[in-house]
Amino acid sequence: MDRQRRPVARNPHIGPGDSRPLKSAQQINSPSEQPDCEDQTLVTRNHEVIRRWAEQRGARPATTPFSEMNGRLGNLRFDFPGYGGAILQPVEWEKWFDTFDARHFRFLYQERHPDGSRSNFNRLEPPRDEL
């Protein structure tokens, strides 16, 4: 099987278990809320905000093959156009959000880079007491 390596949409300045971006992230609770600054890290659990962010970038909900356990998705991902989605398995939004909610994840993301270009940065964070 020919597998392509998928670029990781993570901030290279964040190490494993580093909660700095979450502490300084602006909470967004609805699609009508706007960030104070477009290049800052944002955090939400709102399904509409997450879905809108992904769809604006052409990203679709996905998981990694064979990661499902007990009827729940294993790894939640977004399949961005042109980033090796052949190794990802598409899933329905409802199933993606069911897993997101069951794990009490928070969605960290960014709208724009400091230069104004659109950012694909995103990361799922576990509940705060697990950090």
Image: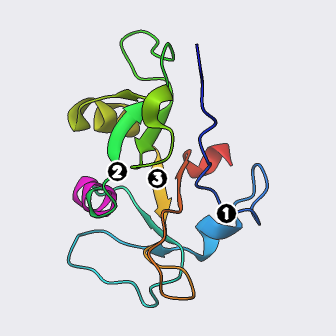
Q: Looking at the image, is mark 2 or mark 1 nearer the viewer?
A: 2
Q: Looking at the image, is mark 2 or mark 3 nearer the viewer?
A: 2
Is 78 or 75 nearer to us in this picture?
Answer: 78
Q: Is residue 101 magenta?
A: no
Residue matched to label 2: 59
Q: CA distance from mark 3 to mark 1?
A: 16 Å
Indicate the secondary structure of the residue bearing disc 3: strand
Q: Rate crowding at label 1 as few (under 14), some (14 to 19) or many (20 or more) other CA atoms within 10 Å.
A: few
Which residue is at 26% across, 54% downward?
51
Indicate the secondary structure of the residue bearing disc 2: loop
Residue matched to label 3: 106
Three-letter code for the amino acid on which mark 1 is drawn = Asn
Three-letter code for the amino acid on which mark 2 is drawn = Ala
Figure quadrant of the N terminus: top right
Which residue is at 47% across, 81% downward?
117
Q: Which tag, 3 or 1, sits closer to the chain's start?
A: 1
Residue matched to label 1: 11
Q: Is residue 67 left or right of residue 44?
A: right
Which residue range is magenta in the image?
47-54
Q: CA distance from mark 2 to mark 1?
A: 18 Å
